[in-house]
């Protein structure tokens, strides 16, 4: 590229999902409702875990972290998306774009690692239940959670730093709903083939390494469950993993189907749909999955509801 075609831009334009006003208003209402449900659902999960002593276990400690990740990931993308649905000029500043890219990459990586940590927790619970609390002690749980946050953050910091040091062309339009890394890199005025390879390799490693750990954990879990003699015992053992396994299938399944394919990287439309899935749908569904399929969470919710009803009755009197 000629030097005059290169520039250091101060802002970008996000093209989003649609240019039709009525469609944008409809999407604004839909995504606003889903975002509020996400905030409420994850907030209730965290509150229940904090208030109910029966939920003060390693599994729910990690679930609290997962809820924080989900809310943070959704918040890094959805509010800006909602504003742009109603804005005439859909711009985002250079620093705002860099921050959004950093947080979305970091939180996505944290979630994948955290799900692998939760799989290990379920492995210990099913395969070595007598030593569960001795193995999964508070110190180890904290270290595993910290490692999850640090690994995602380091990976994101490296990619964000590399991406925003590249010279940008005069075209400032990002054909995406947010500052997604491949969409931003494609605006540069230099050859990005090596960048794309590094990005995809890093994504695969951060995705496939935790997935392999999850797979190994569940191979051992299923093997142990099949050795249980009683049907009731097998059902109880499987029930302890059902919620986590459902979330794993949602998160890893979509990512693997999208990225681990023999053809090239996802299309622009696929990229937008994937971002919407992880920013809106997954954070909204996770609390529902853990609430609807988990007796302890349902019991804690019923207890809290009963206490609230009792307090309301006393105040009314």
Image (cartoon, grey):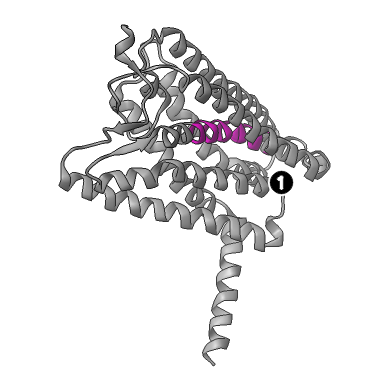
In magenta segment, residue 119: yes
Q: Residue at x 52, y 23 (%)?
A: 161
Q: From this viewpoint, is residue 32 visible? A: yes
Residue carrying label 1: 58
For the residue pair 20 and 163, the one nearer the viewer reads as 163
What segment is highlighted magenta in the picture? 102-121
Task: Identify the image quadrant of residue 119.
Answer: top right
For the residue pair 240 and 27, the one nearer the viewer reads as 27
Q: Residue at x 60, y 75 (%)?
A: 307
117 with respect to 67 (left or right): right
Quadrant the C terminus occupies: bottom right
Please count the marks in the image.
1
In magenta segment, residue 293: no
237 with respect to 182 (left or right): right
Residue 157 location, x and y as percent?
56, 27
Residue farthest toward the bottom in the current orientation of the protein:
317
Q: Give the SS element for disc 1.
A: helix
Residue 180 location, x and y as percent?
40, 28
170 with respect to 295 (left or right): left
Residue 110 location, x and y as percent?
58, 34
């Amino acid at each position: 590229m000629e030097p005059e075609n290169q520039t250091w831009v101060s802002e970008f334009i996000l093209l989003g999902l649609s240019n039709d006003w009525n469609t944008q208003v409809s999407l604004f209402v839909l995504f606003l409702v889903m975002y509020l449900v996400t905030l409420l659902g994850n907030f209730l999960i965290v509150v229940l875990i904090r208030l109910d002593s029966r939920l003060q276990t390693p599994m729910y400690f990690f679930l609290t972290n997962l809820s924080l990740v989900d809310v943070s990931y959704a918040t890094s993308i959805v509010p800006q998306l909602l504003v742009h649905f109603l804005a005439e000029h859909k711009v985002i500043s250079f620093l705002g774009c860099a921050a959004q890219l950093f947080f979305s990459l970091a939180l996505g990586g944290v979630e994948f690692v955290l799900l692998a940590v939760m799989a290990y927790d379920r492995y210990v619970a099913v395969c070595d239940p007598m030593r569960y609390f001795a193995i999964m002690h508070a110190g180890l749980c904290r270290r595993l959670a910290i490692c999850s946050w640090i690994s995602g953050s380091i990976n994101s910091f490296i990619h964000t730093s590399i991406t925003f040091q590249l010279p940008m062309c005069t075209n400032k339009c990002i054909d995406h709903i947010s500052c997604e890394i491949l969409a931003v890199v494609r605006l540069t005025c230099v050859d990005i083939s090596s960048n794309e390879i590094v990005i995809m390799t890093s994504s695969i490693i951060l995705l496939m390494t935790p997935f392999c750990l999850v797979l190994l954990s569940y191979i051992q879990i299923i093997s142990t469950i099949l050795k249980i003699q009683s049907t009731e015992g097998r059902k109880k053992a499987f029930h302890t993993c059902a919620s986590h396994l459902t979330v794993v299938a949602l998160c890893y399944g979509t990512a693997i189907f999208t990225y681990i394919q023999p053809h090239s990287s996802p299309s622009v439309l696929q990229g937008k749909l994937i971002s919407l899935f992880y920013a809106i749908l997954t954070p909204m569904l996770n609390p529902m999955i853990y609430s609807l399929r988990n007796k302890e969470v349902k019991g804690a919710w019923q207890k809290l509801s009963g206490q609230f009803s009792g307090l309301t009755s006393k105040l009314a009197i």
